[in-house]
Image (tube, rainbow, N blue to C red):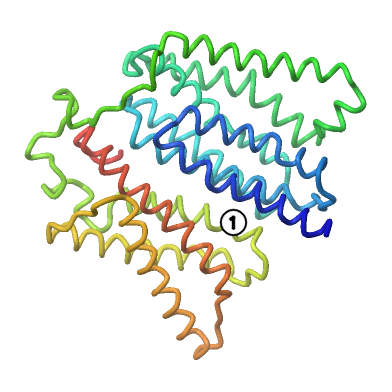
Amino acid sequence: MAEVSDQLIFWIVVSVRFLLPLAIPRYPLIGILGCMIVDAVDQLVFQLFTNLPLEGYQGYDKSLDIYYLTIAYISTLRNWPNLFAFKLGRILFYHRLAGVALFGLTLYRPLLLIFANVFEYFFIFYEATRLRRDPNRLTEWELIGAAAFILIVIKLPQEFWIHILDMNTLDWIRSNPLALLVLVGWGAGIVMGLWWLLRGVPRAVERPSILDDPKTAPTAGDAPGKNLPQDRLINGALIEKIILISLLSITFAQILPDVRATNLAIAAGVTAIIVINTAVSQGLARRGTEWSSIMAEFLVISAMNLGLVAGAAFLLPSINGSINLDNALFMVLLLTLNITLYDRYRRLHLERFAVGIR
């Protein structure tokens, strides 16, 4: 009975960690803070309420962290009108993504210090700032200064505490009861900071369509389908999707049971699926077909990708290969979700700036 209860708690926590990030594109600040809170307390919940062994949970934890950070990065395509902030955020995100992928391959903990997660707090800084002022007024030096402050003052000490000293917060509190006051003060500071940010905002911040703003709306010659970079099969978006989804898939492959494929094979499979998806999407766009909703796009692309996996599962035995269908199903849904969000929000990004991602 206890084992069933432990598994129930485990899957509830993991399900929350998968579903909560889907709120980030529409509610960026609330969504990312919710993900951070769940990330901060999940192991504490396991320690207090289950008897689960947690030796290997760090791999799960880092993979789930990268999952919600990936959703956050993709949401910047949708929400960020400051192009320099977007480019800086992209650099910070891929810096962390590369570090987590290397950690998954080597389990060398100092990598998580070297590739510190500055993107997360930079994302929060930007989204909190836009509640109080026009984000387009943020200068390049202000953005660089914010990123440097986050790295030096917040993230390097935090990553050193967690990954080099290997300090457990619960054990630290047990051995130093006064440390609880530090955590309570930190939490109170966050709450008061949020109150200060939100007290002048009487309702949720409206995010009107970029097409409603004549300053950012594309001209007729810049509209999608009018020789913009996404009309070519091989373009920056395709390359970025391959890099992004391949690294994300390799990171998750390290924690899935019975994964026999090499990292190169995973990257090759992901590349094939992305190229096919992109070709089909561009073919439909040229015919004038538009998705009625992002959910419809996700369901149709998922069905197509599952068909590709089923075909591979049928053909591989003829060359002495095989596929773990449970793992394949999970990976297909994961990559399809991110491909769908990326494609949809990149179109908004292109419409906003009337250029390709540079």
Left or right of residue 354, residue 193 in this image: right
Amino acid type, mark 1: Phe
Rendered location of residue 270, percent (x, y): 45, 63
Left or right of residue 170, residue 202 in this image: left
In this figure, what is the number of numbered marks?
1
Residue at 49% x, 91% y is 318
Of 184 and 58, the residue lying toward us: 184
The image quarter containing residue 308 is: bottom left
Left or right of residue 157, residue 191 in this image: left
Rendered location of residue 351, percent (x, y): 21, 37
Image height of 325 relative to 338, above or below: below
Rendered location of residue 48, percent (x, y): 82, 40
Q: Label 1: few (<14), some or many (≥20) within 10 Å?
A: many
Which residue appears farthest toward the bottom when viewing the image?
A: 318
Image height of 170 relative to 253, above or below: above
Of 181 and 305, the residue lying toward us: 181
Of 311 and 111, the residue lying toward us: 311
For mark 1, give the secondary structure. helix
Which residue appears farthest toward the left when viewing the image?
A: 220
Residue at 44% x, 22% y is 126
> In the picture, which quadrant includes the N terminus?
bottom right
The residue wearing badge 1 is 252
Of 41 and 204, the residue lying toward us: 204
Image height of 265 relative to 221, above or below: below
> In the picture, which quadrant includes the C terminus?
top left
Which residue appears farthest toward the front when viewing the image?
A: 1
Left or right of residue 233, residue 45 in this image: right
Residue at 21% x, 47% y is 229
Rendered location of residue 316, percent (x, y): 49, 84
